Amino acid sequence: MTTLSRRSVLRGAGGLATAGTLALPHIANAAATTASVWFTQGFIPSEDTALRKMVADYEKQSGNKIDLSIVPYAPLRQKEVSAVTSGVVPDVMEDADFSFTPLNAWEDRLLDVSDVIETQKSQFSEIVLVGRRLFNKVTKQRSYYGVPMKVASVTFHIWKSLVEKAGYKVSDIPNTWDAYIDFFLPMQAKLRAKGMRHLYAMGLEVSTLGVDPLNTFYSYMIAYGGKGLVTPDGQLHTGDPQVKEAVIKTLTRFSKLYKGGHVPPGCVNWNDADNNNSFHAKQIINDFNGSMSIELAVIDNKEEYADNITHGLPNGNDGKPLPAQIGEFGAVIPKGAKNVALGKEFLKYAIQPTVLNEYLKGGLGRWAIPYPSVIKSDPFWLHSGDPHRLAYITETMVGPGIPLYEAYSPAAAQVDAEHVFQVAFSDIINNGMTPEAAANKAFKRAEVIFAQYPLPQS
Amino acid sequence: MSTTAISAAPCNAASALATSGQRLRRAARRRRLLANVGTALLSFVLLVWTIAPIFNIVMVSLEGHDDVFGGRIWPADPSLDGYWLVLSEGYWYLEYFWHQYGNSVCLGVAVTALTLLIGSLTSFSIGRMRIRHGWVVTNAALLTYVIPATFLAIPFYRLAQAYGMMNNLWSVIAALVAFATPYAIFIFQNYGASIPMELDESARIDGASPWQIYTKIYLPLMTPALVAVGTYALLLAWNDYLYQFLLLSSKQSMTVPVALAQFLNSDEAPWNYMMATAVIYSLPPIATYYMFRTKMTGGLTMGGVKG
Amino acid sequence: MEAVQVFDGGRPAVGHLVRLRALRGALRGSEYAWALAFLVPYIAVFFAFVIYPVSYGLWMGSKPSLYATLMNDPTYWTSIVNTALYLGIAVNLKMVCALLLSGFFMRPGWWIKALLMIYVLPWAIPSMPAFISIHWFFNGDYGFLNDLLYDLFGINGPAWLDSRWLALGTMITSYIWKWMPFWTVILLAGRMAIPSEIHEAAKIDGATGVRGFIHITFPMLANLYFVCTLLSTIFTVGDFNTAYFVTGGGPAFSTYVLATLGIRDAFDLSQPRLGVAAVITALPVVIPLVYLLMRKLKTAQVQL
């Protein structure tokens, strides 16, 4: 039996602790010559392969090393927020969602990347550049805090077979907003009469989960003339009568669609995947969903792929084309990154038109390239014969567009995260408010939020 | 008359006894029947309650991609394709399935072993050896729970960096052990309170060292609690997702729950593969629990020391 | 010291012995060193991995303006109500059922043991797929439950997730489904600690069934039950998986709990300090529970 004395135990423990502390700096400073890069996992394997190839090409060309982490999308936001908050950051990260970059640029947690943008400034589309020109509350100025690499917008998706089964023709689909929506409503009764018990005319994302409800609400609001909700100077215009009318009209339209039984009742609580599930199960004829994920998911099934129609935004009720909201993802360099120069070098390489084009083509064009000239010159984008891509890219890069409101003010990012207008819809349906009252309540909340992000009036 | 009366009396008494005995037996049988019916009913309810969502999971895992929301209560065309795909790493999200599975196993074993060891040592020292001011340690341990673990992720992230433990499984092990051990200590304390101190006393008198008392008396008697807490620690590590995800960066070093999270990547996940993965992944802890379940019945008998 | 009989004239003699020992101040010399050595591993873990994160976490929530922002958020008040209901109903209902079922699983018979194995399954299945599947299960339009109700009974089940109270009920049910097995196992272990002699003696005295439970079993389990309930409540404050995957916090944030709100604020709004502040506002409930736990653990006496 060994005799342990109190002193010997304490000495031992103390010794361990000291040894540990002394060993730390050594380990932490090990890798100073590689840049660590986080990119989101793609939605299809070829996206990841294309990314890896791009990184490998860079390494070969430059002789530098890149430590690439391909991170799953869903938890990426948590990882990035943890990183920027704790100061333990990679050198380059792809932003996890539309709100991340505006909010963190505001908080001065990202580095200015204007020099990277400069190298391709003439190539970028104007909307895309505006989308990354974000306000920093510390410098009190706007500058470029993200390098845009991928562009997306939201289109309608239609099952041709269901339209035809209901006795209608796809060529008859009208091209003005309200007529377009109304076109699908009577199909529900006809298809139900044919035994499709669970069928609804359309999916309407009105829940408080994910980005789809935001896209849905804003596209209707813009169609009804409410584009000026937030102006490029970042000011909120809830007092503008045109905006007010548009919001009330949108909410009224939604509640009529819902109460009329034209949309699945579960849509009040749909999460990101639910509308897609519904669409795939052919429970809805028409769905409004961002990017080409719906089509690409069935790309291997030729029949389904052909049956699926991608339809861009119809024109407004006045016949004039509506601007689509253009969302973008790209890379940011967080403050505290250890290899800023190397990170910037890598980004400058990555956004070269040929390199970026190859990378995005590897992803089967799920994301559009932010260079109008490439869109025109490379037949892959508009002239590949694929009708889905044609419709999608036309809406994203060719037709009229506006950036997301997040770009104008980070307050819009918070309004979106709080799903203020979707709460308004719920107020109408569940709490019996009138659309006017619900809209006013939503406006009040938006005003409170905007007050938390004071931007100088220009 | 009196003779018949007298001779009849014991017979009456005997038959009275006999009938009352019969009645008692019948009553006992009825009680048993009721108990059995009650047990059967409760068993059925429990079975349905437990299995219903699991049935849904299994059903989804057996279906083809497009049938998941078809509105049927049994798959039209059940197939084990999903399972085969997972086991053969045939889908790109599951590329490193076995590697990640191995990491899960390492993580699970390490966390379980350390939690049980540290937890039982601490609870032995405080609860059995009754070290002075031991309550300070238990009270301090409670501080761990003041803020829920999810919200401690960011400070932990910083800490791992400071210790140079980033992208290292040990950082996750440390975090999970730190969260599981206080719980283990409390359960052991509580459970150990029903083991009489004489057992320790008499062993001391017999000249046993604390270590021997710990290993020969304390641990064997604590087995049911060890199994329960051990399974808890195993499942905590087995299903943890946030810490592994935050502290580890490469696909090879991640674990299966992170692989599962990939399915939330897209709007279009192949749910059948995800559910197949979930089912396969749930089996080892169940199997482990099954292996140890006999240890759960280790009870205490008075007047003696076991082993 | 002679071996003391546990039952000494019906009055437990052990507690007496223990108290004497504690009063005398227990260990000397090398025994003290052993006891200390046994404590060192946890103390090391505590100092290395608990003190910093918890202090940092508390610091993160220490800006007063955070709480003003929180109170202004209408979702915050909904979350408080929901969390209170969740903690009050879900935790206690689950613990009561766990307690009763732990008794059930003590019965002999191979089918009981087999049932226990199946019963433990929800615990083993990872939260995320389990709750996602439950989310589908309860879907009003294409969920399994409503399909079953229609096919078996011809009734159109309600939209379980589309109104606040139904969704909250669904959430609570899912929570109980997932965690009840765990606490049943813990309480079962606790029951195993009760020596069979006591049950024998009780049976002879006629205290079986309900009477036996109330007068014999429960008092012995009471401490464990109480500790478990307190711990479970503290754990549940941080539970956001259930709300997030089963109801999505919807419809329209009406089933949000503090943990879900905290996660949303921390990560969706990139404001981690606000997120931590949200769960810190649960401290006025957590601290008394922690205090009660401390009291319980300090005075844990032998129950015999």
Image (cartoon, coloured by chain):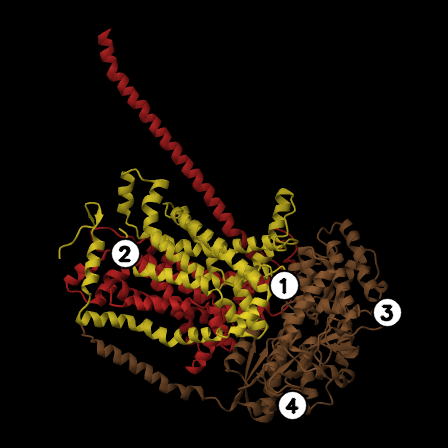
Chain colours: A brown, B red, C yellow
Percent across and percent down for residue C158 are 63, 49
| x 41%, y 38%: residue | B35
Q: Are marks 2 and 1 in contact (CB under 8 Å)?
A: no
**Which one is closest to the eye, mark 2 or mark 1?**
2
**In the figure, is residue B191 to the left or right of A347?**
left
SS under mark 2: loop
Q: Is residue C222 visible?
A: yes
- Check chain identity for marks 3 and 1: say if they share one: yes
Structural distance between the alpha carbons of marks 3 and 1 = 33 Å
Checking the image for residue A318, the label placed there is 3
Farthest-out residue, left: C1
Considering only order in the chain, which callout, 1 or 4, is on the residue closer to the N terminus? 4
Q: Residues within 10 Å of mark 2 (few under 14, many from 20)?
A: some
Considering only order in the chain, which callout, 1 or 3, is on the residue closer to the N terminus? 1
Question: Would you place residue A409 above or below residue B1 in this image?
Answer: below
**Which residue is tagged 4?**
A116
**Which residue is tagged 1?**
A271
Q: Quadrant of residue C203?
A: top left
Q: Quadrant of residue C151?
A: top right
Question: Would you place residue C25 above or below residue B3 in this image?
Answer: below
